[in-house]
Image: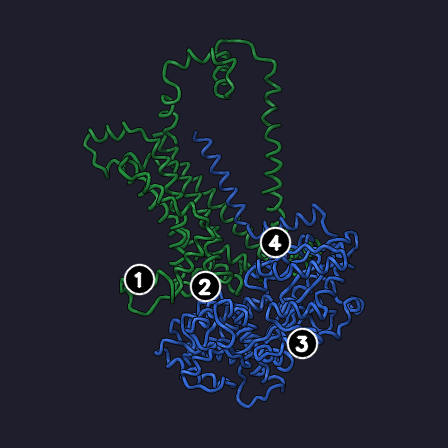
Chain colours: A green, B blue
Amino acid sequence: MTSAPMTSAPGTVPPGTAPQSAPTAGPTAAGRTGGGVAARLRRSGGGPRRPGRARRGALPYLLLLPALLLELLVHLVPMVMGILMSFRKLTQFFIQDWSRAPWTGFDNYELAVDVNRPVGKALLDSFLTTCLFTFLSVALCWLLGTAAAVFTQHSFRGRGLLRALFFVPYALPAYAAVITWAFMFQRDNGLVNHVIHDQLGLGGAEHTFWLIGDNSFWAMLTVSVWKSWPFAFLIVTAALQNIPRDLYEAAALDGAGVWQQIRRITLPSLGPVNQVLVLVLFLWTFNDFNTPFLLFGRSAPEAADLVSVHIYQSSFVTWNFGTGSAMSVLLLLFLLLVTAAYLLLTGRGRKDADAR
Amino acid sequence: MRRSAATATANAAVNAAARAAAAAVTVAALLATATGCGGGSTDGAGSNSAPDELTYWASNQGADIAADQAALGPELKKFEERTGIKVKLEVIPWSDLLNRILAATASGQGPDVLNIGNTWSASLQATGALLPWTAENFQAIGGRDRFVASAMGSAGAAGQDPAAVPLYSMAYALYYNKRMFQEAGIEKPPATWDELVETGRRISGGGTSGTWALGAEGANLANNIHQVFVLSRQHGGSFFDAAGKPTFDTPANVDAVKQYVDLMARDRIVAPGNAEYDKNQSLQDFASGRTAMVLWQSAATSFKAHGMKEGDWGTAPVPVPAGAAPGTGGASVNSMVAGINMAVFKNTDNLDGALKFVGFMTSDEEQKVLNRTYGSIPPVKAAQGDPAFADQDLTVLRDTLATSAAPLPQVPEESQFETTVGTAVKELFADAAAGRPVTTESVRAKLAKAQQQMAN
């Protein structure tokens, strides 16, 4: 995307034609860019400021106002309420009229972070499991998505079909897909065990449990990667379209092999896209609720106890919404921190690279 | 370009971070509806401002939702003809029912009349959202004495006005496959646990015969609770003391849980694969002849739905310890009082209509029709005597309810108890299935952990 100003300019506005066409297009141009160009040309020509400018300055904000209000209503108000709830003892005795729930200060938070007591320890275990799960899932999704995108970058027979096939998991409704996986992972009649044990003869005749016990982690990771990697594939495929082919041609003329082209041209050009992609994948995977809930129900095995289901269980199943909210707020803080640190680090890295 | 990418990233981060607070946000949104839009009166007083209409949430009792709509439709029509009140029906699947009720409680935007699992009675009573069944309200539906005592015991905490009235009653029984018993040369169903294990070993052959003696639903938390509750009572234990404090890891409870899990771990009469069952797979196994017995509540209609024919299975009371005579209290308890209760939301805008509707659904006539359809037992005394409920199958269930069924603890923390102890049993089954030892110590540790989780 950084290469966009440089590479897309010739594509959209053929060099040399812009100055001539702009003045004629100016008065009738509906697009913002056209008006902008015209205005700039006028200004550079030393023309007087238009009197309507001040009014037009307020217009964008007026147009934004409904969206801003909705944003407040949809995002901020519930978040603030969630934060307020986390300071109350909101159990089933008070949910009918939560304004009666007593204020408890930081009690809910103390309960959630005290790792020497069962609630805090369970939350910490769940948090660490989630971190490991997220790291592995994002890494695998990115690796698979990038590899597949690079592989299908150059046209060949059947490329469209292959790409369509790769998208299938992303197009399927998550609920149906994960339920199907749950059936495939069943011990006695599941397809996975049938293939591994009965047909390939791996691991002896004794079938493996995938939905209970420690293996549930790997089952969940499999489904998560299967479900999310097409997104990485989609984004990287789109980003690859932006790399000009002449770069590869020039590199090939200079004698660079395929691997060198990938390392020196493809990956650096993907940098900004990857920054967004990895962050979005991280946030989605970290918060993923559907996959564990549909695979394991409301009580996930310890090895696969992701923090989203854990919080759901802490609030909805045990009817203690105050503690659940406190855990949610902690999670929110953690994710904001990670996001900020990530953007800061990767942003600075890129600025350095650009400066060089 | 860079700038907009960064903005997009920041937006994505904010969006996703907001999603992080999923649980909180959901509840908060519900509360926002409650406080902001001021729907039902949150002070809880009912009114009669909409006397011509009722909304009714029915639990999913039949094979599917369409079956329930077909079964209830004509009855609601009958009610409308008699009273002029139109009942809007919504059938809600089990997995959603409790969450929907909680949401309705928090928002004040609920139905007028609803079904609840009878084990939730005390938990929901504590929210204060349900209409208490005072003597006066009972009068409107013909009096409290019309209902069977054991069913009334499962309608709310002791010493308070009930939060609901019983609608359908169910009980646990031992279902056995007659053909498999015959082939194994077993003449009568086991009456004690020793006999069950002995019979089971003959059928299972220690896991070598390809068929298994008993089905279990190891990852189904509610079912685990129902089973260990009965065993705990038989061992003289209890999961809550008189003051309502959890007492999960007492020796009696440890013995009870261990005895249940040992059916797989030590006695090897339950297939290890059952440890992950949570979608009624054990009923499928039973119907297809893979297991010879199953302990289940009012299962006849399910068996038929899975393709069994009347007479393929036999029904017997759930086993008791050797020497325990039926109907002698503690050791002879062999079922929970299972069933569905009917409740009225306190802030209904058609209080008189709601009472009329509950009266209609619990009338002798409707009780016979509805319970016959669902294969359950009427909790109304007069309807229970009907010959339709006197076949071999239902007689066992009826006698169990009348003499040896006990209600699950009627405490506000009941639903937490189901989750924590149900999970403990699930984890122990997972251990047993993986071949890890299940010892008195490991059982006690799991139960102690479950109890600590209740402490918040």
Q: Nearer the viewer, mark 1 or mark 2?
A: 1
Q: Which residue is mark 3?
A: B386
Q: Chain of mark 3?
A: B
| Disc 2 from disc 3: Cα separation | 47 Å
In the image, what residue type sits under mark 3? Asp
| Disc 4 from disc 2: Cα separation | 26 Å
Q: Is residue A164 left or right of residue B244?
A: left
Q: Nearer the viewer, mark 1 or mark 4?
A: 1
Q: Which residue is mark 2?
A: A301
Q: Nearer the viewer, mark 4 or mark 2?
A: 2
In the image, what residue type sits under mark 2? Pro
Q: Chain of mark 4?
A: A
Q: Quadrant of the N terminus of chain B?
A: top left
Foreground of the two, B113 or A30: B113
The quarter holding residue B115 reads: bottom right
Q: Secondary structure at mark 2?
A: loop
Share a chain, discs 1 and 4? Answer: yes
- Name the disc covering residue A86, or none: 4
Residue extending furthest toward the bottom? B323
Q: Chain of mark 1?
A: A
Q: Which residue is mark 1?
A: A196
| Disc 1 from disc 4: Cα separation | 47 Å
Share a chain, discs 3 and 1? Answer: no
| Disc 3 from disc 1: Cα separation | 55 Å
Proximity of marks 1 and 2: CB atoms separated by less than 8 Å: no
Q: Nearer the viewer, mark 3 or mark 1?
A: 3
Proximity of marks 4 and 2: CB atoms separated by less than 8 Å: no
Proximity of marks 1 and 4: CB atoms separated by less than 8 Å: no
Foreground of the two, B402 or A133: B402
Q: Residues within 10 Å of mark 3 (few under 14, many from 20)?
A: few
Q: Chain of mark 2?
A: A
